Image (tube, rainbow, N blue to C red):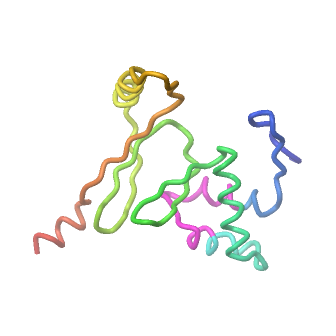
Amino acid sequence: MDGLNTSAKTIKYTNQRMEILKFLREFNGHPTVDDVYEGVKCKLSRISKATVYNNLRFLAEKELIKEVNTKGVSRFEANLVTHHHIICLECGDIKDYESEELTEYSLNVASKIDGFKIESTDTNFYGYCNKCRRKQNG
């Protein structure tokens, strides 16, 4: 596969991009740049962390993956289905949360913003996961 037509732009699929996409599709969660680097360097021993970072940014810009930021750390995911996130304020763990009702409600509310055409929505819920709450409670 030499490229994919997305938004009228052809994307060249390099070996690095293919391995990064494969890793993200198989990873259960929202890995950091370091996680992706560690995951792909087994197959691409000469890849640098900068190459991984640049390819992640490129793929996110082309909307082939999503970037989620939490606690100042970029995390990435291949799940492009509309969903929301539940993020722990203590450990930074991120879980996907799918709710058609929440998505429809958000789009309905956002559609009432004058002078702005909403294309999509996502919501982040912040709190404490069970593991961190147990730690807090002793």
User: Camera-side residue: 117 or 2?
Assistant: 117
Point 50% across, 32% down: residue: 120
Q: In what quadrant of the picture does the C terminus appear?
A: bottom left
Please tell me whether the stretch drawn in magenta is mainly helix, strand or loop: helix
Point 41% across, 24% down: residue: 113
Count of numbered badges drawn on the protein: 0
Point 50% across, 26% down: residue: 116
Left or right? Give the position of 115 relative to 52. Answer: left
Task: List the single residue furthest toward the bottom.
Answer: 46
Q: Position of residue 101 (x, y in %)?
A: 34, 26
Q: Position of residue 22 (x, y in %)?
A: 68, 56
Left or right? Give the position of 8 relative to 30. Answer: right
Q: Is residue 35 magenta?
A: yes
Left or right? Give the position of 133 relative to 57. Answer: left
Left or right? Give the position of 106 relative to 54. Answer: left
Point 77% across, 63% down: residue: 16
Task: List the single residue furthest toward the left.
Answer: 137
Looking at the image, is 105 positioned above or below residue 43?
Answer: above
Task: List the single residue furthest toward the front.
Answer: 115
Q: Position of residue 69 (x, y in %)?
A: 47, 58
Asked which quadrant contains residue 41, the reply is bottom right
User: Camera-side residue: 95 or 5?
Assistant: 5
Looking at the image, is 94 positioned above or below residue 11?
Answer: below
**Range of residues picked out in magenta:** 20-36
Q: Is residue 43 magenta?
A: no
Asked which quadrant contains residue 93, the reply is bottom left
Q: Position of residue 37 (x, y in %)?
A: 64, 72
Asked which quadrant contains residue 112, the reply is top left
